[in-house]
């Protein structure tokens, strides 16, 4: 049944000139039919390069919006219309406008996990993979980082030469991981390396063996000589790594680290999108797109 659906998706993709982009947090059966799988930065870069007429983004809304902003001539479909990122909507445009008016000297650096509307007010975007490089390289010293306080703290600790002000947002799922989870997982798997996403709180990232983006975590685990790993990011990464790394063992840091939005997309949704029947076609006014594009262009320019 799964194979039949996958074969039909592959056939329709070819027939209808569709490219499927999938974030690493998607299910394994979806990654298997994707043309490109990656973290937010890799997917944003692909979005700007893809040749196909239609792009299906298997991920969450801000990722599909990023594709539309960078590739306006394409039909961009979000695989499941309900898949948002709660963090992306944590601050309003009015709050950000107020801050900018009060602090005109600050550059606004936004995590790419923001709405298109917020992006229109930001100077540069970053992803977890590109944040340190970009914040080090931009000329401004005074920065407001929005909205993730954990990624912001990680940047602040690693780029002490900049004055970084933070807001109190964050990923509701990554925030659930605690120091107690680290202690329990280390005790249960004393030989394992702890690999975590910078969206986790400082009490979790502090003693980690590696901190990085979803792709960064996967690359580290694949290349490492170690045989066991505790994974401190969305739990689908545990499954993907277990499929890909024979002879290695992967354990979730906590069972709570499941992103309900990333999990909304099913293979059936992807099939419907390929038939032109499902998902949501992303529409955006040209004015908003151009205003939001500036900070993504800056991200790609500084991020390399
Ligand atoms: P990455 O940029 O590491 O893919 O992270 C995206 C995300 O939403 C993590 O929760
Ligand atoms: Fe957003 Fe968190 Fe889900 Fe990532 S894991 S998409 S930050 S809610």
Image (spheres, grey):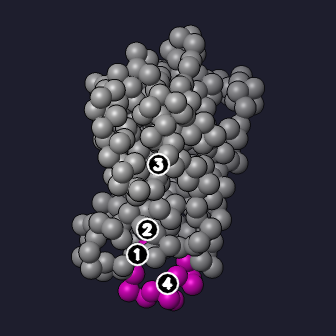
Secondary structure beneath dot 4 equals helix
Circle count: 4
Task: Estimate how packed mark 4 is, as few (under 14), some (14 to 19) or many (20 or more) residues with alpha carbons within 10 Å.
Answer: some
Distance from the alpha carbon under mark 3 to that under mark 4: 35 Å
Q: Is residue 119 left or right of residue 67?
A: right
Q: Which comes before the other along the chain, label 2 or label 1? A: 2
Residue at numbered disc 2: 238
Magenta stretch containing residue 187, yes or no?
Answer: yes
Quadrant housing the C terminus? top left
Residue sitting at x 43%, y 47%: 23
Q: Is residue 191 left or right of residue 89?
A: left
Q: Which comes before the other along the chain, label 1 or label 3? A: 1
Number of the front mark, 2 or 3: 3
Residue at numbered disc 4: 186
Estimate the x, y position of residue 56 in percent, counting from the top left: 43, 34
Secondary structure beneath dot 1 equals strand
Tag 1 near tag 4, CB within 8 Å: no
Magenta stretch containing residue 161, yes or no?
Answer: no
Occupied quadrant, residue 275: top left
Distance from the alpha carbon under mark 1 to that under mark 4: 13 Å
Residue at numbered disc 3: 267
Tag 2 near tag 1, CB within 8 Å: yes
Residue sitting at x 61%, y 32%: 115
Which is more toward the observer, 231 or 23?
23
Distance from the alpha carbon under mark 2 to that under mark 4: 16 Å
Q: Does the Cβ of the disc 1 residue fall within 8 Å of ligand 1?
A: no
Q: Above or below — where is 67 with respect to 59?
A: above
Estimate the x, y position of residue 74 in percent, counting from the top left: 40, 20
Q: Is residue 303 left or right of residue 164?
A: left
Q: Read off the magenta span.
A: 182-194
């Amino acid at each position: 049944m799964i194979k039949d659906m996958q074969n039909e998706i592959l056939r329709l993709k070819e027939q209808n000139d569709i490219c499927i982009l999938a974030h690493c947090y998607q299910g394994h059966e979806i990654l298997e039919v994707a043309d490109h799988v990656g973290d937010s930065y890799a997917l944003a870069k692909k979005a700007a390069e893809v040749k196909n007429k239609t792009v299906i983004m298997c991920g969450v809304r801000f990722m599909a919006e990023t594709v539309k902003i960078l590739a306006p001539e394409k039909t961009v479909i979000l695989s499941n219309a309900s898949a948002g990122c709660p963090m992306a909507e944590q601050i309003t445009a009015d709050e950000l406008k107020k801050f900018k008016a009060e602090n005109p000297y600050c550059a606004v650096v936004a995590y790419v996990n923001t709405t298109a509307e917020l992006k229109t007010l930001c100077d540069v975007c970053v992803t977890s993979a590109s944040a340190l490089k970009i914040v080090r390289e931009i000329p401004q010293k005074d920065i407001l980082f929005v909205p993730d306080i954990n990624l912001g703290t990680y940047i602040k600790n690693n780029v002490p030469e900049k004055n970084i002000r933070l807001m109190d947002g964050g990923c509701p799922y990554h925030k659930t991981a605690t120091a107690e989870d680290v202690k329990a997982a280390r005790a249960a798997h004393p030989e394992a390396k702890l690999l975590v996403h910078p969206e986790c709180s400082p009490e979790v990232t502090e003693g980690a063996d590696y901190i990085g983006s979803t792709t960064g975590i996967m690359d580290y685990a694949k290349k490492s000589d170690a045989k066991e790993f505790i994974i401190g990011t969305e739990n689908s990464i545990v499954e993907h790594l277990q499929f890909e790394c024979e002879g290695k063992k992967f354990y979730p840091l906590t069972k709570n680290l499941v992103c309900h939005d990333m999990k909304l997309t099913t293979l059936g949704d992807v099939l419907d999108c390929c038939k032109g029947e499902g998902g949501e076609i992303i529409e955006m006014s040209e004015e908003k797109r151009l205003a939001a594009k500036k900070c993504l262009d800056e991200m790609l320019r500084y991020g390399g």
